[in-house]
Amino acid sequence: MDWDEFAHWGKHISEWGAQYHKALPDTPVRAQTALGDIAAQLNQVPPENGEDMAAILEDFETIVMPGMTHWQHPRFFAYFPANAAPPSMLAEQLVNTVAAQCMLWQTSPAATEVEGVMVDWLRQALGLADGFTGVIQDSASSATLSAVLTMRERATGYTGNKDGLSNKGHLRVYCSDQVHSSIDRACWVSGIGQANLVKIPAIGPRFEMDVDALQQAIADDLKAGHTPAGIIAITGGTGVGGSDTLGPILAVAKEHDLYTHLDAAWAGSAMICPEFRDEFWQDVDGFDSIVFNPHKWLGAQFDCSIQFLRDATPQLNTLKIEPEYLKTTGAPVTNYSEWTIPLGRRFRALKIWFLLRSYGLEGLRQRIRNHVAWAGELCEEIRAMDGFEIASEPILSLFSFRCPGDDATQQSLVDALNDDGRIYLTQGEIQGRKVIRFQVGQFDTTRDDVMMAKTVIQDIWEKIQ
Ligand code: PLP
């Protein structure tokens, strides 16, 4: 392909993209294909000779698109959103086109310098204290793994990487039972082990860590000769939005000199609104590490996860490695690949720059406030439905409910709703009972889209009776 053809097809794809997004409201949200349908339509051997882009794009439309679930659909109420605001998509197109690998300052100084400033813009937007720096990672899972590795190294005097973990006893990490599975996985792959991730029961309407139980667990572990290494708190857990009260957890961490990490992957975006900071983020500045995903609720196209660090040194002491081929000469510079597990890095900061400049914080705040308000309204509508119960009250824009019947009935309703296609939602669990989750957060959703969900739920519920 030459560059004139590239320009032609690039224009074609942009136009296709605009039409795709305009047509989304009339498209089923979840892909309606059966297992294997898409793979069966692909040639099972690679082509020996090149094909025309026109033919490739035609197959993309007829074979691939029917198998896509539409995350940018305004009635996507499943999981958490993965918002891609149009300006952030444009930034990604530019990043894809320039196609730089930004592992070191010198491999693209602009990428490093824009990243530094964007992390600081977001620090200010979230009201975090002046001293926080940070890095853009691909995912909250990677940021949390980085934090857990730092806990491990700090607790072993930075000898785990060098010497391994044998003869180091049991390092213990504490969190509530509401955390995302990425915390479990970080403990698996760091060598700490699932058995040493101590899950403290969550209590109260906010599903928050029971701090007395945390204290007791640490005391028991010390008595047993274990080594407490760190605490992971959450704001906005995946299941029902579980949110810890931060101050008392930090006090326990301080008493035992533990490294602290806060997972606010979803809810962090809402902290651009001062009222939500007041509600959820008292004392947040005491955390050593905080992760939030602008690729979830804020609108920076996937992938884009920010890890803020109160002091980057422990993480650098854990992850930095500098073979000869990566050394650079001249003045000391920031090389963000030293802060993370992967070496190669995309230029993720550009989409944050485009997003924040296009909407301004105020434009983004208004969206998030609407989502929270509309989730509250819909929750009341569902509460009033005959036999339905609210299983967890709204935490920001996430609540859960149950229809009349057992767990299998909840799943049947979820499946029937998703087969219908007008809305898309997913199930969760509270204390062993299946619930139906509902989150409002898609970038283009309107109040009408949200309120329509009630009609659809009622309609499908009547059909499956
Ligand atoms: N933490 C929470 C609370 C989440 O909801 C999720 C994903 O939904 C994650 C962490 C993992 O995020 P990522 O996909 O960026 O690894």
Image (cartoon, rainbow, N blue to C red):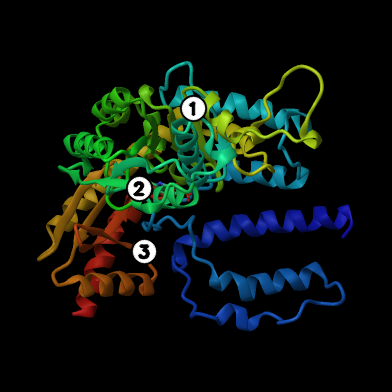
User: Badge 2 is on which residue?
Assistant: 196
Mark 1 beta carbon near ligand 1 (under 8 Å):
no
Q: Nearer the viewer, residue 350 or 321?
A: 321
Pointers 2 and 3 in contact (C-beta within 8 Å): no
Query: For the residue marked with disc 3, what is the amino acid?
Result: Ile
Tell me the kind of residue under disc 2. Asn
Whole-percent x and y of residue 93?
69, 47
Q: Is residue 117 left or right of residue 186?
A: right
Task: Identify which residue is drawn at 36% across, 73% down.
Answer: 420
Give me the C-alpha separation between circle 3 and circle 1.
38 Å
Judged from this view, the residue extending furthest toward the left is 387
Give residue 309's mark.
Answer: 1
Instruction: Please state which of the two labelled residues, at mark 2 or mark 1, is closer to the viewer.
Output: 2
- Relative to residue 401, is residue 207 depicted above or below? above
- Where residue 254 sits in the image (x, y, percent)? 32, 23
Residue type beneath disc 1 = Leu
Mark 3 CB within 8 Å of ligand 1: no
Residue 114 horizontal/vertical position (percent): 65, 28
Front residue (pair 53, 43): 43
Check disc 3 and report its element: helix, strand or loop: loop
Q: Quadrant of the N terminus?
A: bottom right
Does residue 352 sit above or below 18 in this rendering? above
For marks 2 and 3, give the CA distance. Answer: 40 Å
Res. 28 visible in picture: yes
Residue highlighted by disc 3: 423
For the C terminus, the quadrant is bottom left
Of pointers 3 and 1, the one earlier in the residue sequence: 1
C-alpha gap between disc 2 and disc 1: 24 Å
